[in-house]
C-alpha cells in the first residue's frame, strides 16, 4: 500500500476517529505519569509525514502539541515530576520524515522536559534498542519508566509478536496497535511461503495449526472472529493482560482494521475505555465512515443500563457483594465506566421489596450511593 501512496494523502473519517482516541488517551496518560515518574517514553513507530492533504494534523503533531500543553499545565500547578519526556517518531520513508521535520519546525517546542527524536528507519530496528535500554534500567535500578508505543502501519507487516513480547517485559508499557484484520485474512487465505512468514511473525509459531484450520473456514465473518480470538491468545501468552479492541469500517461498512489497546496497567485500561467512549458513545467500540457525514459521533439506540444490568446479573445474581467488587468488575472486566455502574444500580434500587429485579443495599451513608464498603444484594435470576 505504501508504494502507491504519495508522501502525503487525504485524511479519511476513520483516521480522524483514530486520532481522537490517540489524543484523548495520550493526554490522560501523560497527565498521570508526568506527576509520578522521572523518565517517560513515547514512540510513534509509523509516524507518517505529520500532515494530510487537507492540512489536518497527523499523529506526531497531535502528540507534540498535547505534550507541550500537558507538561506546561503540570508545571504551572507544581505537579510535574517528570524530568525527561522522550518522544520518538520513526518512519521508513525518507520523504515523509522530511515532511515531518518541516512540520515540527513550525512548532515552538521551547520546553526543557521534552526530548524529540525524528528519524528515518524501520520500526522494529529502531524500537528494539529503546526497549532494551528500558529493560536494562529496570533490571539495574528497578526504575519504572512508563512507555507508550503507537504502532500504526499500513497493513499487516512492520511489527511482530516478538517485539510486543519484548515491550511487555517492561510491565509499565502500553501499546496502541493497528491490527489489519482484513489484510490478515486475505494473506491467510493465500497461504504460501512468503505469507506464512508474515502471518507467523504476527501470531507466533505455536499458532500455526490453528491458523491453518481458520484458513479453511468458508465464512469470512467466522474467520475474522477466529483470527481475533487467536490473536488475543497470542497476546496473552506475551503477558498482555488488558486488551481493548475498537473496529474501523469504511464508507461501505466493510471492516478496515481493528485498533487494539494493550496494557497491563489498570488505570491505562480505564483511561483508554474513556477515550473510546468519547468516539463511540454506543459502547460498541466501532466507527464506520458509512455512519457519518461531516459528523464524528456515532449514536446507536443502545440502552447501556439494560445491557450492563444483564451483565451484572449474569455475574452476581443471588449474591451479596461489596461496592468494591462491583466497581472492579465493571471497570476492569467490562467496557463500561463507573458512571454507567452508578446509573444502573440507581435504576434497580427500589423500596418495594417484592420487585424481582431490585438490589438491596446496606452499609452506606445515604441512598443512591455505592461506596466500596457498601453491601449489595442482587436478586435471583428470574
Ligand atoms: C498509516 S501511516 C501513519 C500515519 C500516522 N501514524 C498518522 O496517524 O498520522 C503508516 C506509515 O508507516 C510507514 N512505514 C511503513 N512501514 C514501516 C516500517 N516497517 N517501519 C516504520 N515505518 C513504516 C509509512 O511510510 C507510513 O508513513
Image (spheres, grey):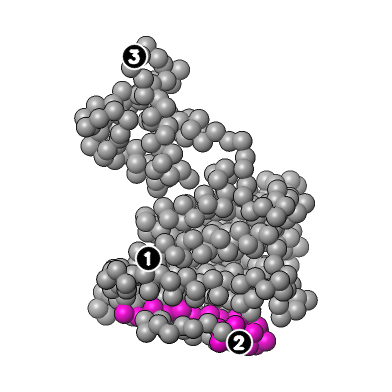
In the image, 296 versus 226, the foreground residue is 296
Is residue 2 in view?
A: no
Q: CA distance from mark 1 to mark 2?
A: 27 Å
User: Circle 2 — which element?
Assistant: helix
Identify the image quadrant of residue 282.
Answer: top right
Q: Which residue is rendered at x = 46% and y = 43% of the image?
A: 336
Considering only order in the chain, which callout, 2 or 1, is on the residue closer to the N terminus? 1
Residue on which disc 1 sits = 31
Identity of the residue furthest to the top in this view: 354
Considering only order in the chain, which callout, 3 or 1, is on the residue closer to the N terminus? 1
Identify the image quadrant of residue 260.
Answer: bottom right
Considering only order in the chain, which callout, 3 or 2, is on the residue closer to the N terminus? 2
Left/right placement of residue 135 relative to residue 159 reads: left
Left/right placement of residue 321 relative to residue 52 reads: left
Q: What's the magenta region?
A: 83-105
Give the class, few, some or many, for how many residues have Cα within 10 Å of label 3's Cα (few <14, many ≥20).
few
Residue on which disc 2 sits = 102
The spot of residue 159 in percent (x, y) is 57, 72
Is residue 109 in view?
A: yes
Left/right placement of residue 381 relative to residue 186 reads: left
Amino acid at each position: 500500500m505504501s508504494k502507491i501512496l504519495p508522501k502525503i494523502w487525504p485524511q479519511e473519517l476513520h483516521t480522524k476517529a483514530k486520532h481522537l482516541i490517540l489524543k484523548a488517551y495520550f493526554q490522560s496518560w501523560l497527565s498521570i505519569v508526568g506527576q509520578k515518574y522521572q523518565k517517560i517514553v513515547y514512540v510513534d513507530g509509523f509516524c507518517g509525514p505529520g500532515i494530510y492533504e487537507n492540512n489536518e494534523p497527523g499523529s506526531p503533531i497531535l502528540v507534540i502539541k498535547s505534550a507541550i500543553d500537558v507538561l506546561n499545565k503540570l508545571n504551572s500547578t507544581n505537579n510535574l515530576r517528570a524530568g525527561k519526556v522522550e518522544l520518538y517518531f520513526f518512519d521508513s520513508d525518507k520523504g515523509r520524515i522530511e515532511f515531518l521535520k518541516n512540520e515540527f519546525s513550525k512548532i515552538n517546542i521551547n520546553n526543557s522536559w521534552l526530548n524529540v527524536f525524528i528519524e528515518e528507519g524501520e520500526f522494529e530496528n529502531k524500537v528494539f534498542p529503546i526497549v532494551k535500554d528500558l529493560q536494562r534500567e529496570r533490571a539495574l535500578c528497578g526504575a519504572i519508566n512508563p512507555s507508550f508505543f503507537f504502532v500504526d502501519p499500513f497493513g499487516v507487516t512492520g511489527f511482530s509478536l516478538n517485539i510486543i513480547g519484548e515491550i511487555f517485559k517492561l510491565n509499565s508499557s502500553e501499546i496502541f496497535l493497528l491490527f489489519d484484520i482484513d489484510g490478515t485474512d486475505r494473506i491467510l487465505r493465500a497461504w504460501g511461503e512468503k505469507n506464512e512468514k508474515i502471518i507467523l511473525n504476527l501470531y507466533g509459531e505455536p499458532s500455526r495449526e490453528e491458523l491453518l484450520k481458520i484458513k479453511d473456514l468458508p465464512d469470512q465473518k467466522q474467520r475474522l472472529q477466529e483470527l481475533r480470538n487467536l490473536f488475543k491468545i497470542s497476546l496473552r501468552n506475551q503477558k498482555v493482560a488488558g486488551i481493548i479492541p475498537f473496529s474501523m469500517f469504511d464508507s461501505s461498512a466493510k471492516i478496515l482494521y481493528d485498533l487494539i489497546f494493550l496494557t497491563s496497567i489498570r488505570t491505562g485500561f480505564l483511561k483508554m475505555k474513556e477515550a473510546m467512549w468519547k468516539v463511540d458513545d454506543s459502547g460498541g467500540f466501532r466507527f464506520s465512515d458509512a455512519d457519518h457525514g461531516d459528523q464524528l459521533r456515532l449514536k446507536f439506540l443502545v440502552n447501556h443500563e439494560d445491557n450492563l444490568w444483564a451483565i451484572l446479573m449474569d455475574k452476581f445474581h443471588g449474591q451479596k457483594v461489596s461496592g468494591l467488587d462491583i466497581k472492579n468488575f465493571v471497570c476492569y472486566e467490562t467496557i463500561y465506566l463507573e458512571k454507567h455502574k452508578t446509573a444502573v444500580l440507581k435504576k434497580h434500587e427500589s423500596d418495594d421489596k417484592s420487585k424481582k429485579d431490585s438490589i438491596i443495599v446496606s452499609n452506606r451513608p445515604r441512598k443512591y450511593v455505592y461506596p466500596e464498603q457498601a453491601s449489595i444484594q442482587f436478586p435471583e435470576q428470574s
